[in-house]
Image: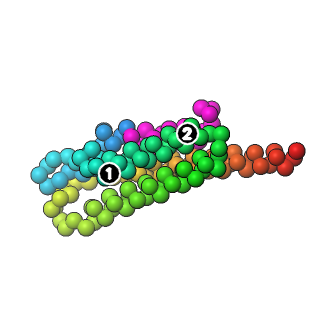
Amino acid sequence: MIQRIQTLYLFLAAVISAGLIFVFRLWTNSEGAEVFALDNYLYLGLFIGSALLSLISIFSFKKRKTQFVLGRLNIILNFILLGIFVTQSLNLSGETNVSEKGIGILLPVFSIVCLALANKAIKKDEDLVKSVDRLR
């Protein structure tokens, strides 16, 4: 379980989704207050949901197909989160709510990259097992 590279990618995606939301701000509003993911329950729920999907995927290492599907669902969840951030930042005119964007808006992108690499490694393992089964 631990020695597989996809476990490290999934763990990194979980750390990005659950740990870094406390460190990096999403944006700074016009009053100068920093907005974190903790300030909005929707953002917090989506980030925690992504981290939980990554952890569930890590512990379902014996079922590679389930692990692959959970990885795809997690990628979709992160795309939804990224879409919400993009529409939030583009729909606001000028300096009304979002004054300065933070690095926290890019956290779903980093998580998507880690999840895509994990799914690639899971697919590689599944192909390897299928090739060995053909030889029997």
- Which residue corresponds to the image point at 69% horizontal and 45% vertical from the top-left? 125
Q: Residue at x 49, y 52 (%)?
A: 74
Crowd tier of the residue under label 1, counting other residues whose Cα lies within 10 Å: few below 14, some 14–19, many 20 or above = some
- Magenta range is 1-18
Quadrant of the frame with the N terminus? top right
Please give left or right for residue 132 compared with residue 116 in the image.
Answer: right
Residue 19 placement, left or right of 57: left
State the SS at label 1: helix
Q: Residue at x 23, y 47 (%)?
A: 39
SS at circle 2: helix
Relative to 39, does residue 77 appear above or below in the rendering?
below
Most prominent secondary structure in the magenta stretch?
helix
Residue 9 can be seen, yes or no: no
Q: Is residue 69 left or right of residue 75?
A: right
Give the x, y percent position of residue 27.
Answer: 24, 51
Place of residue 55 in the rendered image (x, y in percent of width and height, measured from the top left): 50, 39
Task: Judge by depth and name the residue closer to the eye, 109 or 79.
Answer: 79
Is 106 magenta? The answer is: no
Quarter where residue 85 is shown: bottom left
Of the residues under marks 1 and 2, which one precedes in the sequence? 1
Number of the label disc, if any, that sits on residue 58: 2
The answer to whether residue 54 shows anywhere in this view is yes
Residue type of the residue flagged with mark 2: Ile
Q: Residue at x 59, y 32 (%)?
A: 2
Q: Amino acid at mark 1?
A: Tyr
Q: Which residue is mark 1?
A: 43
Expressed as whole percent of the image width and height from the top left, the position of residue 5 reads 60, 39
